[in-house]
Image: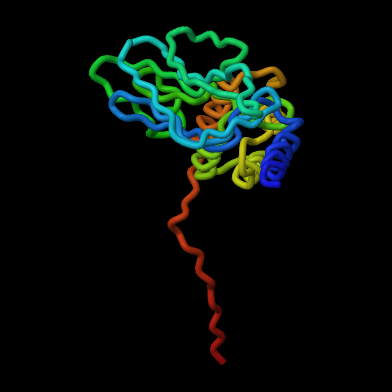
Amino acid sequence: MLTRLRDYAYSYSELEYEDYSDGIISGCKIATTEDRLILNQGLIHYGGHIYLITEPMFMEYHPTNTWCVFKICFLDANESNGYLCRAIEIHLSEDMNLESNEMELCRFKLQPGAHLRTKYVDFFDRCTEFDTLINIHAPFCAIEKSSISPEITRAFVREARLYEVEDLDIPFFMQVLNTKGAVSREVIELYLSLRLRKDFSSCSNLDIFNAFCEILRSLKSGNKLDFSQKKTKKRKIVVC
């Protein structure tokens, strides 16, 4: 009975994401120590299956002054004691090319004596070349096509909303803030195409990030909203 319930729950999860792309569903946040990368718990959709990371996974790193990619590798399924097991491994490589069974989690270029940063000064800082953890290229699970990290889309909205935006921005901002996971890639491409009057139908995650940066620069060249002034009601006193 318990086995049937377990199998039903797993099958239901796979059916729920049947029309979704490969990519991170939730969690899988990356932290760092002085010499280790930490992939935290999370859910990943790959090859029609759901992979559950139940405990942190660790990978040592050191300064190389060249690009390194932190990636996850999906191993072939194997049967053991009546169970079908699908295992994963994590790798750190200077080879930026991915095999068909690999998925990028982040990349960085660390200089000797420097500290690998996971916190950013502003939105633009997320793509700083040296000593910065960059997760722009990581695919996130979304309808039909993988999308960019929801952390990035929300960071864009939270910075952009401080300025006088255009009417087209408002519904997109609301959808980003109201979406639990990654925003549909089709929605993002449509917004960017209308906003910048360019074709984004076949763009990469980096193209999306650069487009967000272009919009932010445009907004920052305008007026910043002043939230410090409180509106007060005016009273009219009539003296008879």
Q: Quadrant of the C terminus?
A: bottom right
Residue 166 position within the rendered picture, expressed as x and y whole percent measured from the top left: 63, 40
Pick whichever, 220 or 93, lies toward us: 93
Residue name at image x 62 percent, y 35 percent: 182
Which image quarter: residue 14? Answer: top right
Q: Is 122 drawn above or below residue 75 in the view shown?
A: below
Residue 95 position within the rendered picture, expressed as x and y whole percent measured from the top left: 47, 7
Pick whichever, 5 or 211, lies toward us: 5
Q: Is residue 143 left or right of residue 77?
A: right
Q: Is 224 drawn above or below residue 84 in the view shown?
A: below
Q: Is residue 94 left or right of residue 238?
A: left
Query: Looking at the image, how many numbered discs can be counted on the residues?
Result: 0
Q: Is residue 195 visible from the viewing direction of this image?
A: no
Residue name at image x 38 percent, y 15 percent: 109
Residue 181 position within the rendered picture, expressed as x and y whole percent measured from the top left: 61, 39
Residue name at image x 42 percent, y 14 percent: 68
Which image quarter: residue 94? Answer: top left
Pick whichever, 168 or 202, lies toward us: 202
